């Protein structure tokens, strides 16, 4: 499994950043050729399931995920969301942490451990580098609110 870690510090309040980072359909708008569909009724929380579908036509795959931990930030307490990935192609987990930063704003930590079916472990460093690029771009877009 490849481990991807990304950190950002932003001027927005933790509660605002939390809402942006847990807007699951917005994730799909940040990754090229991807659509995200929420499968459970709102509001978001533990048990929320959604699928990111990436690709074109027959060259597509689903990345189904479920929220297994949901702790929004509040009163100086960090926010933590953990997702389990259960697809045939993509397996692993993701953890999003939002904490107050000293002097205002907040710090975001996105950690993801993933494996792709058919990709040998010897290519884990390449997969991790690609993950940092793709997830870093998605994180930046979500933080901008675009």
Image (tube, helix red, strand yellow):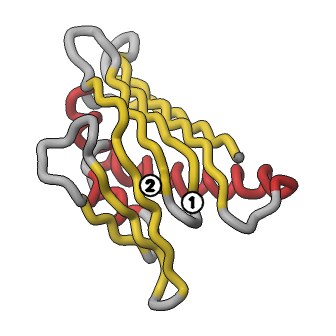
Asked whether the beta carbons under mark 1 and mark 2 sit within 8 Å of each other, the answer is no
22 displayed left or right of 98: left
61, above or below 48, in the image? below
Q: Where does the image place residue 61, in percent across and percent down from the top left?
A: 50, 74
Residue in the image at 19% along x and 42% along y: 44
Q: Quadrant of the C terminus?
A: bottom left
- Viewer-proximal residue, 62 or 128? 62
45 displayed left or right of 133: left
Picture quadrant of residue 116? bottom right
Residue holding disc 2? 138
Residue holding disc 1? 90
Q: Earlier in the sequence, mark 1 or mark 2?
A: 1
Q: What is the secondary structure assignment of the residue under circle 2?
A: helix
Q: What is the secondary structure assignment of the residue under circle 1?
A: strand
Label 2: few (<14), some (14–19) or many (≥20) C-alpha neighbours in 10 Å: many
Q: Which mark is residue 120?
A: none
Residue in the image at 43% along x and 48% along y: 139
């Amino acid at each position: 499994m490849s481990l991807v870690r990304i950190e950002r510090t932003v001027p927005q309040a933790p509660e605002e950043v939390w809402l942006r980072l847990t807007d699951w359909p917005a994730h799909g708008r940040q990754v090229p050729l991807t659509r995200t569909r929420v499968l459970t009724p709102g509001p978001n929380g533990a048990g929320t399931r959604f699928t990111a579908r990436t690709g074109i036509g027959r060259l597509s795959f689903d990345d189904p995920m479920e929220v297994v931990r949901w702790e929004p930030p509040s009163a100086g307490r960090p926010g933590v969301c953990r997702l389990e990935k259960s697809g045939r192609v993509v397996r692993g987990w993701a953890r999003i942490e939002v904490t107050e930063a000293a002097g205002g704003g907040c710090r975001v930590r996105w950690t993801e451990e993933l494996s792709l079916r058919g990709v040998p472990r010897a290519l884990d460093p390449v997969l991790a580098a690609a993950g940092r690029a793709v997830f870093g771009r998605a994180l930046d877009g979500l933080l901008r609110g675009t």
